Image (spheres, rainbow, N blue to C red):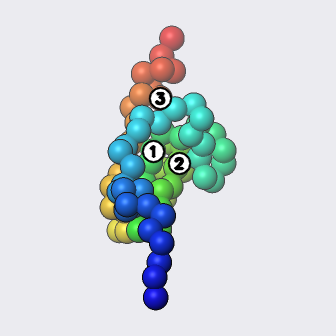
Amino acid sequence: MTRYPETDGAVDELEPPHELTALDRCDSCGAQAYIRVVVSSGELLFCAHHGRKHQEKLSEIAHSWHDESSRLVAESRP
Ligand SMILES: [Zn+2]
C-alpha cells in the first residue's frame, strides 16, 4: 500500500482571510458580499441584508464571522 504524496500537506492549511471585494457575491441573491461566514463545511458569503437575515441561525455553527457591512454604509454616503 504505497500512496504517492501529491502534496506536502501545505494545501490543507486554511487560507489566510482576504478582504471582501466586488467579486465576492452573496450566496443568496448575488449582490456584493459584505459578510463572510466560515462554517465546518466551508465558507459562506452574504450581502449585508442576507447576513443579518441568517445571522441568528448561522451564529450557532459559524467558526468565524467577518462583517464588512460597515464599509457599505461608509461607501453609500454622498
Ligand atoms: Zn443577499
Q: Residue lying farthest bottom?
A: 1
**What's the residue at 36%, 56% (across, down)?**
10
Mark with earlier residue (1, 3): 1
Query: Which x, y percent locates residue 64?
Result: 33, 55
Disc 1 from disc 3: Cα separation = 11 Å
Query: Which x, y percent locates residue 20?
Result: 47, 36
Residue 41 located left or right of residue 28: left
**What's the residue at 66%, 44% (across, down)?**
30
Give the amino acid at mark 3: Leu
Q: Residue lying farthest right?
A: 30
Residue position marked by numbered label 3 in the rendering: 72
Crowd band around label 2 with a 10 angstrom C-alpha radius: few (<14), some (14–19), many (20+): many
Report helix, strand or loop for mark 1: strand
Residue position marked by numbered label 1 in the rendering: 35
Disc 2 from disc 1: Cα separation = 5 Å
Q: Is residue 33 visible?
A: yes
Q: Is residue 64 above or below residue 33?
A: below
Query: Which x, y percent locates residue 31?
Result: 63, 40
Task: Check residue 46 in the rendering and tell me which mark sits there, or answer none.
Answer: 2
Report helix, strand or loop for mark 3: helix
Q: Nearer the viewer, mark 1 or mark 3?
A: 1
Give the amino acid at mark 1: Ile
Mark with earlier residue (2, 3): 2
Give the amino acid at mark 2: Phe
